[in-house]
């Protein structure tokens, strides 16, 4: 998983495990230069700064820099620090044949990715529990029943069978108010944001407020559309929308803030909707894991309170699997038409998976799977909480009992060393810093881990939990 | 299927069949205003001009205009002609709740689409012959064999199993030279062009020459990316690239010009590649139906002659079905990385269909299906040619024996009346005019039909052919 390192300004695909940290960092930096993500002439952070940011030893960074200087990718000069070599140019216009050519020596081999033994990074459900047999059965039923023209060029909003099934499911499970015409099927949440960013920008939107904590890749999609993304304050009650003024829109995770794990406070739900109605603002509601609440019925979607000012975004990536590449947006009518056009005017999502998901929803297989997954993840969360109480009483899981991840608050100034210690043990886990907006408005930055307890397969879960407890401050 | 009507400047979803022409036109125009495709204040063509363009009676257009003036969508004033009413505004920024609101009366009902009895419009293969049972079997095999992490977030270039299978298949069937790393899987040809347009524009490309005959929707994708798309001349030898100079790139259908049906002339293949090498230009090779040649082995892909100056684009939409939403681009390395990033940095194509297509290709099922489809379409083409000889000796199928469509040259000035007569008979067929670049450089515009003989299911084929012969000038 990519981590947005603040001091480097780019995502560095770095998985430091065991003795390979130096090699891994060297490879990741080389790749960043080769691909042009680090532009020629860019000044790199000092080895001390980058080491602190990555939570690794300063010498490791210094050695990686030295390797890359020797290979010609970087230059180091007294007084001007370490920079990306000008010779390591990204391919100029009209030279299509190759990516940035290393200025000396042969092209470096492709980076080997080191796989951690245990993975507790959030964002992916337990893929081993995907209901393959049920899915194949549903695919057979759906495909056998489909008319021939389902195989042709389709409605850019997506197959009507799926939109109809979703309208019913979202109404009963999340209180979403919609008809199938207002739903646009997209190839995952990020694709939805990409489409939405283009639509909003074309309609004159300039500013979409985001939360102080969230996924950088989501903000990047909005920025890539030319939108400004200032953060909202975050305090002990969660994201605070009180200061929304002339922003055109706001992107929120109301049911279960990602990653902080709290729902949008009741009073603040009202504040957001009032702002939207008063100013004509638009709320983008990311309901990424709305199916998974363990202690009570989940709070309904904001969209149900004001379908004309809220775009609801849901996904099959957490409830089923990201590989399906199916997500959905419920939009006010004018935006639904524009989003369909922005998808390219024809459907870009495969028909078979759409028909299969429709069959899954209407046959009850989806509900059965979600119930079973809810039980699995709830047990894991309970086991995590119990293990913390037994082995790391200073560390507590914050946030509500919901979703596929927990935030573990750590003693001050310990996040980097814990993440590093975990990496050395072969346990991949994210520090909260990765999810903090560079201009976050929040109290004192908290040291914490974001633990994706949904990620491991069943057989690896207890090992992953043991590895986690072993690196937490006792 | 949308038709780009020259005089209206937009696609009008109009399927005139029988007595419903006036209603169909009224609905299509209302929809165009409601959706904002016809902007407020736009002056419509005179009823005489639009009638000629659409090949329908002038009174029909005048009546449709009058209906829409009465409903408030249009205004008609002496001296300024018929215009879209200013009240029929597209939704302004910050009013998300509804699309253009009709200024008087209730919102019009959604347009009913009239389905023609026979469909000979090109672009879609015979969907009834899609190998459903084989596909489901391959899906089961592929899905059962797939590792769990295939269901996670994937490589933005697409699944490695599919890229590996494609590299082998394209090499042996089309002479494409590639390794899996240079292939990027996309959700159909149009999605590929969209990705490519963004990549090229970001690298400073300004001009992509296109052919004088082609699909407007392809050109639209390039234009939407901010690219200029001047047409190349077309003459009796086909598209003429001799005048390529400082264009940055050119989009061609070298194996089988769409829709004119001729391959790019041997000498002109050399001219294009020479231009690309001399100037650093890039060739975009649209190999949409490279599998289907009936008289001899198809000519190999241009890409095989110069993989560093040609982007090869292929698709499953003609060989299998558009609903799969699977196509592929083979790119020079630097562009492959950029295209992967432009897809959004993660894969947007469903994993199950990708794995199934990989299994289809490696198991030989794809080759078997293509052989069977080739035989089916070849027989249809032969039947078409025989029927023309028997019933319409003045009309000849031009172009090589290949693909899923034929161009039938008509007597001068008869195209509109033939298309209209076909529509009245319940036969949907396109005139060549739809495919002509507005600034086409070609001899005297030819009157012709573009007949998609691949479109009907087997049981409707002979009926469609009879209906066609009935409206052709004997």
Image: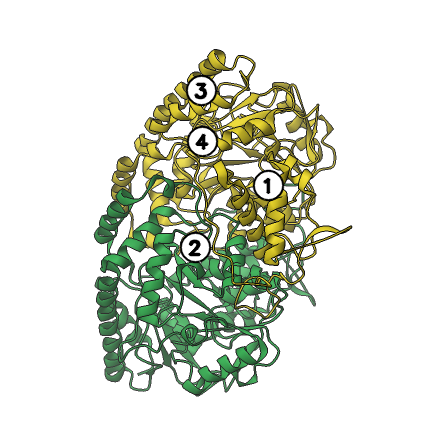
Chain colours: A yellow, B green
Q: CA distance from mark 4 to mark 1?
A: 50 Å
Q: CA distance from mark 2 to mark 3?
A: 38 Å
Q: Chain of mark 4?
A: A
Residue at (23, 83) in percent of width and height: B390
For label 2, the residue is B187
For label 3, the residue is A381
Q: x, y (%) of residue A313?
A: 52, 36
Of residue B388 and residue A34, the one placed in the foreground of this image is A34
Secondary-structure class at tag 1: helix
- Classed neighbour count for the residue bearing mark 3: other residues with Cα under 10 Å, few (<14), some (14–19), many (≥20): many
Q: CA distance from mark 4 to mark 2?
A: 27 Å
For label 4, the residue is A170
Q: Chain of mark 2?
A: B
Residue at (44, 61) in percent of width and height: B182
Position of A284 compared to B18: left or right?
A: right
Q: CA distance from mark 3 to mark 4?
A: 26 Å
Of residue A247 and residue A124, the one placed in the foreground of this image is A124
Q: CA distance from mark 3 to mark 1?
A: 36 Å
- Classed neighbour count for the residue bearing mark 4: other residues with Cα under 10 Å, few (<14), some (14–19), many (≥20): some
């Amino acid at each position: 998983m990519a981590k947005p390192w603040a001091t480097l300004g780019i995502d560095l695909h770095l998985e430091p495990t065991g003795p390979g940290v130096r090699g891994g960092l060297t490879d990741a930096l080389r790749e960043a230069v080769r691909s042009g993500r680090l532009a020629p002439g860019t000044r790199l952070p000092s080895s001390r700064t980058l080491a602190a940011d990555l939570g690794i030893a300063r010498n490791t960074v210094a050695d990686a820099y030295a390797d890359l200087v020797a290979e010609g990718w970087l230059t180091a000069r007294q007084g001007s620090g370490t920079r990306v070599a000008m010779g390591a140019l990204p391919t100029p216009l009209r030279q299509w044949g190759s990516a940035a050519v290393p200025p000396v020596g042969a092209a470096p081999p492709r980076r080997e990715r080191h796989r951690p033994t245990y993975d507790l990074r959030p964002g992916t459900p337990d893929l081993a529990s995907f209901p393959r047999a049920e899915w194949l059965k549903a695919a057979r039923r759906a495909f056998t029943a489909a008319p021939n023209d389902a195989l042709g060029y389709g409605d850019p909003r997506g197959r009507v069978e799926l939109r109809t099934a979703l309208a019913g499911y979202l109404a009963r499970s999340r209180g979403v108010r919609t008809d199938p015409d207002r739903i646009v099927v997209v190839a995952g949440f990020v694709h939805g944001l990409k489409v939405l960013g283009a639509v909003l920008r074309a309609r004159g939107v300039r500013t979409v407020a985001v939360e102080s904590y969230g996924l950088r890749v989501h903000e990047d999609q909005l920025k890539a559309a030319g939108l400004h993304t200032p953060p909202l304050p975050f305090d002990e009650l969660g994201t605070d929308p009180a200061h929304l003024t002339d922003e055109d829109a706001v992107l929120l995770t109301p049911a279960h803030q990602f990653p902080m794990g709290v729902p949008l406070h009741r009073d603040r739900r009202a504040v957001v909707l009032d702002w939207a109605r008063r100013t004509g603002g638009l709320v983008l509601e990311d309901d990424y894991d709305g199916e998974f609440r363990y202690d009570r019925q989940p709070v309904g979607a904001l969209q149900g309170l004001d379908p004309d000012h809220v775009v609801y975004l849901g996904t099959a990536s957490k409830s089923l699997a990201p590989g399906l590449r199916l997500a959905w947006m419920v939009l006010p009518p004018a935006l639904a038409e524009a989003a369909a056009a922005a998808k390219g005017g024809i459907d870009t999502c495969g028909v078979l998976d759409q028909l299969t998901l429709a069959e899954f929803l209407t046959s009850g297989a989806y509900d059965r799977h979600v119930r079973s997954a809810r039980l699995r993840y709830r047990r894991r969360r309970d086991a995590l909480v119990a293990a913390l109480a037994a082995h790391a009483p200073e560390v507590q899981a914050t946030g509500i009992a919901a979703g596929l991840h927990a935030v573990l608050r750590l003693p001050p100034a310990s996040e980097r060393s814990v993440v590093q210690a975990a990496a050395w043990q072969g346990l991949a886990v994210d520090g909260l810093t990765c999810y903090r907006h560079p201009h976050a408005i929040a109290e004192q930055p908290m040291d914490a881990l974001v633990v994706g307890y949904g990620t491991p397969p069943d057989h690896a879960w207890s090992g992953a939990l043991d590895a986690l407890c072993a690196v937490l401050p006792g």
